[in-house]
Image (cartoon, rainbow, N blue to C red):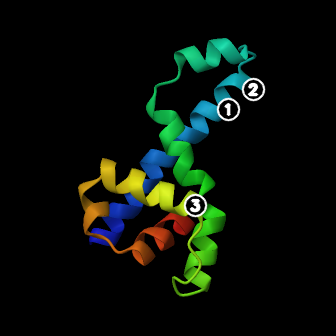
Amino acid sequence: MSRLLLACTLIVLSSSAFAGSFGGTTGGASAAGSSASSGSSSGNDKVVVQAREDAASFVASDGRIRGVQLEAALRHLRASSESARAASDLQLAQAILAQ
């Protein structure tokens, strides 16, 4: 049950990052206009999306390979989600890959 909640939390966090990245390109807005209208959390949500490669390496190596982007994503997730604080690094990395 907690994995499902964690996965849902990650999906919600990442969906706002995807929406923010499309806003400037498909809407024809200038870079300044799109950055001014996006929330401050969208940059932090992108941290999770950008950690996918590091998460894959971490999972494939059974935790021996820990990239800096994964570390940043783990800190961000634990700071923003109660369920993420209770999850192991491996569970969070798997959830990042599952989104």
Q: Secondary structure at mark 2?
A: helix
Residue 91 versus residue 35 in the image, above or below = below
Residue 91 in the image: state x and y as whole percent.
Answer: 41, 75
Front tag of 3 and 1:
3
Front tag of 3 and 2:
3
Residue 13 in the image: state x and y as whole percent.
Answer: 45, 46
Q: Can residue 76 be seen in this snapshot?
A: yes
Q: Amino acid at mark 2?
A: Thr
- Residue in the foreground of this view, choosing between 5 and 58: 58
Q: CA distance from mark 1 to mark 2?
A: 5 Å
Q: Quadrant of residue 57?
A: bottom right
Residue 81 in the image: state x and y as whole percent.
Answer: 29, 53
Q: CA distance from mark 3 to mark 2?
A: 28 Å
In this figure, which residue is indicated by the disc labeled 1? 22
- Which numbered disc flags the more N-terminal residue, 3 or 1? 1
**Label 1 Cα neighbours within 10 Å, binned few <14 / some 14-19 / many ≥20:** few
Q: In the rendered structure, are the residues bearing label 1 and label 2 in contact, judged by CB atoms less than 8 Å apart?
A: yes
In this figure, which residue is indicated by the disc labeled 3? 68
Q: Is residue 11 left or right of residue 64?
A: left
- Which numbered disc flags the more N-terminal residue, 3 or 2? 2
**Label 2 Cα neighbours within 10 Å, binned few <14 / some 14-19 / many ≥20:** few
Q: Amino acid at mark 1?
A: Phe
Q: Which mark is residue 25?
A: 2
Residue 65 in the image: state x and y as whole percent.
Answer: 59, 78
Q: Is residue 33 left or right of residue 99?
A: right
